[in-house]
Image: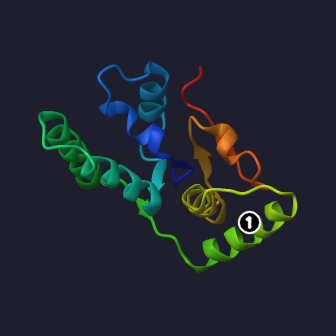
Amino acid sequence: MGLSYLLDTNILSEPARAQPNPHVLQKLNQYSGQYCTAVTVWHELHYGVERLADSKRKECLISYLKALEQGGLVILPYEKIAGLWLAQERGRLSKRGVTIPVLDGEIAAIAFTNQLTLVTRNVDDFADYDGLLIQNWFTA
């Protein structure tokens, strides 16, 4: 079975929380091997860790990210076709007076151009993109 889902930062970071959402954990288990993430999400995760003071929590998060990588998590790049799609979407949305965050746009573009469903808690942040499939694994 191939890749079907692109995980946003809030989904991929959930297992590292002290009390992770059981719905997210169940879906991660259910769809193991069918999800990936975007290089932009990978950046956001590492940036979040880099902002932390040296601590046991920081060490745990670094270990978690290394385990994801060593476990074979696929990290998709932001490529030319995604850049073109995002430019078109930003242009279309700007004509409607909608401004979108560029990093969210990159995540959406990578998901769309790879024909993946974007999995995020922040469904509203991605709702304006045309044709983007979105799921929220925080709900049953």
> Residue sitting at 47 percent across and 28 percent down?
24
19 sits left or right of 2 in the view: left
Q: Quadrant of residue 13?
A: top left
Q: Reply above or below: 88 against 135.
A: below
Q: Quadrant of residue 29?
A: top left
- In the picture of the structure, the residue carrying the numbered disc 1 is 90
> Label 1's element?
helix
Total numbered labels placed on residues in the image: 1
Q: Reply above or below: 130 against 19.
A: below
Q: Quadrant of residue 47?
A: bottom left
Within 10 Å of the Cα at label 1, are there few (<14), some (14-19), or many (20+) other Cα atoms?
Answer: some
Pick out the residue farthest to the right. 96
Q: Position of residue 31 (x, y in %)?
A: 48, 38
The quadrant of the image that shows the C terminus is top right
Q: Position of residue 85 (x, y in %)?
A: 70, 71
> Residue sitting at 56 percent across and 34 percent down?
121
Colour treatment of the image: rainbow
> Residue sitting at 56 percent across and 57 percent down?
107
36 sits left or right of 124 in the view: left
Amino acid identity at mark 1: Arg
Pick out the residue farthest to the bottom. 80
Q: Reply above or below: 84 against 101.
A: below
Q: Position of residue 27 (x, y in %)?
A: 49, 30
Towards the viewer: 114 or 49: 49
> Residue sitting at 56 percent across and 40 percent down?
120
